């Protein structure tokens, strides 16, 4: 092991998080490798799955102005069960992906203020231990995936190559956030495949809107590291567009709303969905208008605020389908 590195003055690691406090001290580095102390990443990976399920699980349409009734209960039970399965799978696969990312990025992480106290550069875990931990988490995700249809399994497996190459993209392109968007929103395709055993145009629109959303929140997230990234040679959309960040964030935000709007149009969802979408647009407008690109704490706050977008769109989908 390498010598432990003092904690950074700016970091998003929460060593006091309740998930870490529940673990014995010897296991806490594994919880941090899986980012259990930073659940926002779980939410950002999970919401596209939940959106797709809520849009595509067969649910009886409201009749004669009557909303939720007993005839909806079986479909809602199916939806709830699938949402639980996807939540478990998301925690496992997000943890596996973060662990893999830390293995590949350990040398870069040691040179960046925000990340130098992660378990591998800080010497709290070895690469071999991290590989075993990544494999165990991936196995949990595999068990859940194998409970679905062969078509859904194929869709799920197709994402693995994207997950594997994402950590390398920041070395070769200024658009690694696009690749992250491909990976983080794959649940929009997988959720649809599980519910319909097919992928419709609504899934494609939701997926593309999700990629644009990722470009918003992860560009903001990457703004925290612009100075250090320039020194160590890490590339990002934050660095690529640092001269006009708000202009590009606006473009990405508009594409997000368009993609989500088309997802509703393709599925002929009820009008209340668009109320939720309007609130999503307002939330994105607030982020873009008020983010402070050179204030890491503000960037982290705006990044974490994107959980609200997930809930707003999910509420809009459910309202549009049930009311």
Image (cartoon, rainbow, N blue to C red):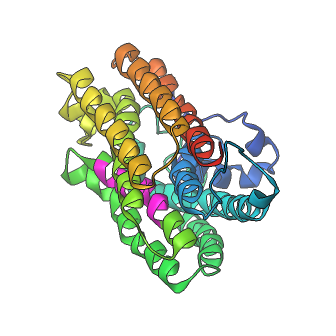
Look at 63% across and 71% down and name the residue there.
Answer: 136
User: From this viewpoint, is residue 100 visible?
Assistant: no
The secondary structure that dominates the magenta segment is: helix
| Residue 108 placement (x, y as % from top left) | 36, 46
Position of 289 relative to 265 (above/below): above
Q: Residue furthest bottom?
A: 150
Look at 48% across and 20% down and name the residue there.
Answer: 297
| Residue 213 placement (x, y as % from top left) | 38, 40
Look at 44% across and 54% down and name the residue there.
Answer: 184
Look at 75% across and 44% down and name the residue there.
Answer: 19
Residue 220: quadrant of the picture: top left
| Residue 200 placement (x, y as % from top left) | 40, 66
Position of 175 relative to 14 (above/below): below
In this view of the protein, which residue sits in the foreground, 111 or 146?
Answer: 146
| Residue 105 placement (x, y as % from top left) | 39, 52
In this view of the protein, which residue sits in the foreground, 77 or 131?
Answer: 77
Q: Is residue 182 magenta?
A: yes
Count up the numbered dots: 0
The quadrant the N terminus occupies is bottom right
Q: Tell me if 19 is positioned left or right of 272 in this view.
A: right
The quadrant the C terminus occupies is top right
In this view of the protein, which residue sits in the foreground, 106 or 256?
Answer: 256
Residue 39: quadrant of the picture: top right
Q: Tell me if 298 is positioned left or right of 292 in this view.
A: right
Q: Is residue 73 magenta?
A: no
Span of residues in magenta: 178-189
User: From this viewpoint, is residue 112 visible?
Assistant: yes
Q: Tell me if 51 is positioned left or right of 24 in this view.
A: left
Position of 3 relative to 59 (above/below): above
Position of 48 relative to 237 (above/below): below
């Amino acid at each position: 092991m390498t010598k432990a590195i003092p904690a950074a003055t700016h970091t998003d690691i929460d060593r006091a998080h309740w998930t870490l406090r529940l673990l014995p001290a010897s296991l806490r580095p594994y919880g941090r490798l899986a980012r259990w102390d930073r659940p926002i990443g779980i939410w950002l990976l999970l919401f596209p799955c939940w959106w797709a399920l809520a849009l595509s699980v067969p649910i009886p349409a409201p009749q004669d102005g009557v909303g939720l009734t007993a005839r909806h209960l079986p479909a809602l039970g199916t939806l709830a069960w699938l949402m639980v399965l996807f939540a478990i799978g998301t925690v496992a696969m997000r943890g596996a992906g973060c662990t893999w990312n830390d293995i590949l990025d350990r040398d870069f992480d040691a040179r960046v203020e925000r990340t130098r106290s992660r378990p591998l550069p800080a010497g709290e875990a070895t690469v071999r231990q991290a590989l075993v931990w990544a494999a165990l988490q991936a196995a949990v995700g595999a068990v859940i995936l194998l409970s679905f249809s062969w078509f859904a399994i194929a869709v799920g497996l197709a994402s693995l190559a994207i997950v594997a190459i994402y950590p390398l993209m920041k070395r070769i392109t200024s658009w690694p956030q696009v690749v992250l968007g491909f990976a983080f929103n794959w649940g929009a395709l997988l959720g649809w495949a599980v519910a319909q055993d097919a992928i419709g145009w609504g899934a494609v629109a939701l997926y593309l809107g999700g990629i644009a959303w990722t470009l918003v929140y992860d560009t903001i997230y990457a703004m925290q590291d612009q100075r250090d990234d320039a020194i160590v040679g890490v590339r990002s959309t934050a660095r690529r567009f640092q001269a006009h960040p708000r202009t590009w964030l606006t473009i990405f935000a508009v594409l997000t709303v368009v993609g989500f709007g088309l997802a509703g149009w393709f599925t002929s969802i009820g009008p209340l969905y668009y109320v939720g979408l309007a609130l999503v647009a307002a939330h994105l407008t607030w982020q873009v208008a008020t983010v402070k690109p050179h204030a890491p704490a503000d960037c982290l706050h705006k990044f974490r605020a994107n959980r609200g977008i997930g809930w707003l769109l999910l509420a809009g989908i459910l309202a549009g389908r049930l009311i």
